[in-house]
Amino acid sequence: MSDRKQRSLSTSGESLYQILGLEKGCSHDDIKKSYRKLALRFHPDKNPDNPDAAEKFKELNNAHSVLADLSKRNIYDSYGSLGLYVAQQFGEDNVNTYFMLSTWWAKGLFLLCGILTGCYCGCCLCCCCNCCCGKLKPTAAGEGAEPEYVSPDDLEEEIRNNPDNGNTDLFYIPCQTLDVFLVRKCLLV
């Protein structure tokens, strides 16, 4: 095991400024000046016998790379190193969404919706109520559901073989897509 202390993610956003010896509201020029001064002092080539200088130089580079980039600096100022970790995992555009969904009221809303619908994915309210038990419910095969497509040949054969010609009339309806006439059987009531 390593004797190095485990770093934890902070939400305050102050430790990178402390590494560079700056205050939180400093300008971009102040960050640049402080980084150059400290980088020259702790550069590994100037301190070959000091392994702590190489470690300090890595920390300086990390602090400068975050604070020199405006979007990373804004995330760091708002959410700390935890915000940088979230930006690395989910993208910089999704950081605000992540922290908004992490609040107590968003978790409560999620729990309430799960209790009310019986499902946590949210599809039950939209899909099941409209498709499974609502007006868009699919008909079962045995409930007299008519096929969606009947070929004209099968329809003509059914009309010819139908012995009950008393209540049926034949209508010729032009079909625009096939430029043929389809025969339809309509029952008169």
Image (cartoon, rainbow, N blue to C red):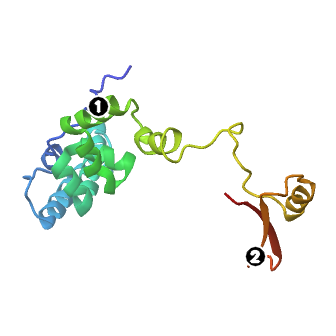
Residue at the image point whose x is 19% and y is 46% from the top: 79
Residue at the image point whose x is 63% and y is 42% from the top: 139
- Res 74 visible: yes
Q: Amino acid at mark 1?
A: Leu
Q: Quadrant of the N terminus?
A: top left
Q: Nearer the viewer, residue 49 or 129?
A: 129
Q: Earlier in the sequence, mark 2 or mark 1?
A: 1
Q: Hey, which quadrant is residue 112 in on the image? A: top left
Residue 52 in the image: state x and y as whole percent: 27, 38
Question: Helix or strand or loop: what does disc 2 sit on?
Answer: loop
Q: Amino acid at mark 2?
A: Cys
Q: Residue furthest top?
A: 1
Residue at the image point whose x is 43% and y is 45% from the top: 126
> Which of pointers 2 and 1 indicates the residue nearer the eye?
2
Residue 151, relative to residue 81: is it above or below? below
Give the alpha-carbon distance from disc 2 to disc 1, as whole Å. 53 Å
Q: Nearer the viewer, residue 169 or 46?
A: 169
Q: Hey, which quadrant is residue 30 in on the image? A: bottom left
- Res 40 visible: no
Residue to which mark 2 is pinned: 175
Residue 131 in the image: state x and y as whole percent: 52, 44
Question: Helix or strand or loop: what does disc 1 sit on?
Answer: helix
Residue 166 in the image: state x and y as whole percent: 82, 57
| Label 2 packing within 10 angstroms: few (<14), some (14-19), many (20+) | few
Residue 43 in the image: state x and y as whole percent: 28, 51
| Label 1 packing within 10 angstroms: few (<14), some (14-19), many (20+) | few
Q: Nearer the viewer, residue 112 or 29?
A: 112
Left or right of residue 150, residue 116 in this image: left
Q: Using the image, tell me which numbered label, if any, was put on residue 111.
A: 1
Q: Nearer the viewer, residue 182 or 31?
A: 182
